[in-house]
Image: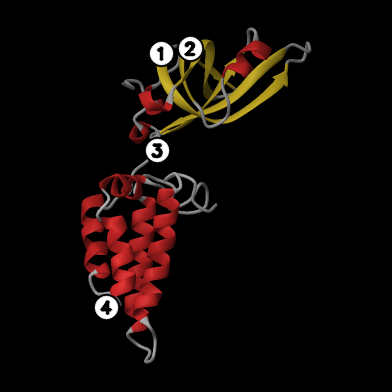
Amino acid sequence: MKTVFITDIKENQKVVSTFLVQQKSMSRTKAGSPYLNLTLADKTGEIKARVWEQAEYVTQLFQKDDFISLESTSVTYQNVLQLNITALTRCPPSEIDITDYLPEAERDRDEMLNELTTIIETISNPYLKQLLDLFWEDQAFINLFTSAPAAKKLHHVYIGGLLEHTTSVANLILTIGSHYGGLNLDLLLFFPIEQANDVASSGAATGAE
């Protein structure tokens, strides 16, 4: 279980914790020695980190977007706090609680799910409704859908982001659609919800950028 978050870290502190690897690159000192340059993250922010010893070996142990467990010391360099890593290992995803590493939606996820469920109940086309119900009756899918970000970079990049974005689009369709005659609101509602279902079903955290 993660116990030290980035906002907790102070200068000259021994830090033993786990982090998400956001960026990873090899660099060289002025003397030509290789070192590993990292950007680490958790739900509270980001921090730079360096591996000075055996960098070419250590870089083979993990990839960008992996979770790593590390031992390090915090130092200030050019007025920026960073970690000097002395040991690290890659963490299997099964040992990670993703809520420790991504921020969450401000709105309650259960509240948004209930709101979206109510909107889905307004769909009168029995075939579209039956298809959506197949997703909604699958608890494993619901767990993925309500925890997935909507994207990787540009918008709703947090836990519950896909649910929040989908609920917002559905409400927008109802609001605007009521001003125009001849629109098939069932289809207009179905397609953004179905696309969100596809994103969640394909892995929950690989939405459009």
Per the image, the residue denoted by label 1 is 16
Mark nearer the viewer, 2 or 3: 3
Per the image, the residue denoted by label 2 is 72
Hey, what amino acid is under mark 4?
Ser
SS class, disc 1 = strand
Crowd class of label 3 (few under 14; some 14 to 19; many from 20; radius 10 Å): some
Do tag 1 and tag 4 residues touch (Cβ < 8 Å)?
A: no
What residue is shown at x 78% (from left), y 10% (from top)? 31
Upstream in the sequence, badge 4 or badge 2? 2
Mark nearer the viewer, 4 or 2: 4
Horizontal relation, residue 204 to residue 62: left or right = left
Give the x, y percent position of residue 117. Answer: 24, 63
Upstream in the sequence, badge 3 or badge 1? 1
Mark 4 and mark 2: Cα distance apart in space: 58 Å
Hey, what amino acid is under mark 1?
Val
Give the x, y percent position of residue 169. Answer: 38, 67
Mark 3 and mark 4: Cα distance apart in space: 37 Å
Upstream in the sequence, badge 3 or badge 4? 3
Horizontal relation, residue 51 to residue 70: left or right = right
Per the image, the residue denoted by label 3 is 102
SS class, disc 4 = loop
Q: Is residue 184 above or below residue 155?
A: below
- In the depicted view, which residue is nearer to us: 52 or 139? 139
- In the depicted view, which residue is nearer to us: 209 or 81? 209
